[in-house]
Amino acid sequence: MPLILAIESTCDETAAAVVADGYDVRSNVVATQIELHAKYRGVVPEIACRAHIENILPVLREAVETAGTRLEDLDAIAVAYRPGLIGSLLIGVTAAKTLAWALGKPLIGVDHVHAHLYSVKLETNAAPPFPAVGMVCSGGHTALYDVQDFSNITLIGTTIDDAVGEAYDKVAAILGLGYPGGPAIDQLAATGSPTAIHFPRSTLGRDSLDFSFSGLKTSVLYQVRGHKGRERGLESLTPSQVADVAASFQAACVEVLVKKIQRAAMQTRAKSIILGGGVSANRGLRAAMANFHLPVFFPPMRYCTDNAAMSAGLAALYFRDGKFSGLDLDAIAYSLFAR
Ligand code: KG4
Ligand code: ZN
């Protein structure tokens, strides 16, 4: 099985990794841009793109050096070429194409969302029974997939408005918790009461596998700021009331995610559940899935958020199957599997 170097630059992390055999992570370098975007409480695409240009070569060098490999020993160069911010994607795709051409190695383009699902295999080489239901929950995606195997993935449900991670980030801003909000809310939620406030759980009809989080987000806003004519501010809440809002919000999110996974598993007769993406690091979600009636696979914590190891791993499968990309590979902002 191959030794693959992958590049990830879909959003605001510049990452490179070397992975052997599809799971043995030899290096995993992630340069985060959190500090650059924190004051805007979200990713600014132009700033992200410029930071990728500055970070890409040092990150690549560190990934190769840490792995203790020589460039000529690599079997292929992989890159997440969709979906993401177009300016960000372009940097990674251009770097990967240049390396592949200069080294005379094959190029392998992978879908970033599919790579998030594959991340459950990293380090452990876990083998989920197929068909599986996959859920990618992150800052950019909340989607369900019918996973026949890791190279045969079909979208079966997605958010009609915000991604769940986006809702976490916005609620964190409402609660004055900074960016990114997911880890902060997760931590605070552990100290609050999940039943203190009953926030709405939108399930969009009996059989729907789609998601909606905008109503929940607005409901948190009204809970904290009050309604028209009776406005109040965050400062009117005690620290324990803020923790209750965080815990109650998290309970609503987790309940919806688990319910939809359950629904999807029934509809597709899945044999296991695979989760990935930044929100799959959430402790509330992990606890809620602990007693699920099917085997559940989460990525190791460090591979939940964006990284290149997951792309290098998935690319090993494509390498085996001879699924290579040409040097005309283009960055694509949207998922080809989007509805
Ligand atoms: O996968 P990721 O790094 O980027 C995208 O592809 O979007 O996910 C980042 C998202 C952010 O919205 C962040 O707030 C959220 O994942 N996140 C979490 C947790 N850790 C990260 N959300 C809830 N609980 C967490 N522990
Ligand atoms: Zn991601």
Image: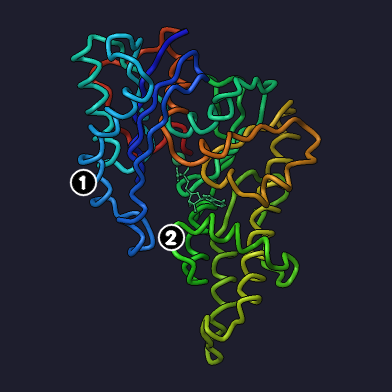
For the residues marked 1 and 2, what is the alpha-carbon distance in whole angstroms?
A: 20 Å
Is 237 displayed left or right of 325 in the figure? Answer: right
> Residue at horizontal 27%, vertical 15%?
326
Nearest the viewer among 214 and 79 is 79
Q: Dot 2 corresponds to which residue?
A: 179
Q: Amino acid at mark 2?
A: Tyr
* In this view, 26 is above or below 58: above
Is residue 11 something one can see in this rendering?
no
Is residue 291 something one can see in this rendering?
yes
| Ligand 1 within 8 Å, label 1 CB | no
Q: Position of residue 155 (x, y in %)?
A: 55, 33
Q: Quadrant of residue 318?
A: top left
* In this view, 158 is above or below 240: above
> Residue at horizontal 36%, vertical 42%?
13
Q: Position of residue 156 (x, y in %)?
A: 59, 36
Nearest the viewer among 83 and 44 is 44
* In this view, 178 is above or below 304: below
> Residue at horizontal 38%, vertical 21%?
67
Q: How many marks?
A: 2
Q: How many other residues sit within 10 Å of disc 1, few (<14), some (14-19) or many (≥20)? A: few
Q: Position of residue 83 (x, y in %)?
A: 38, 37
| Ligand 1 within 8 Å, label 2 CB | yes
Nearest the viewer among 125 and 78 is 125
Q: Position of residue 292 (x, y in %)?
A: 78, 39
**Precedes in sequence: disc 1 or disc 2:** 1
> Residue at horizontal 32%, vertical 18%?
77
Q: Amino acid at mark 1?
A: Arg
Nearest the viewer among 335 and 232 is 232
Q: Dot 1 corresponds to which residue?
A: 50
The residue sitting at the bottom extreme is 229
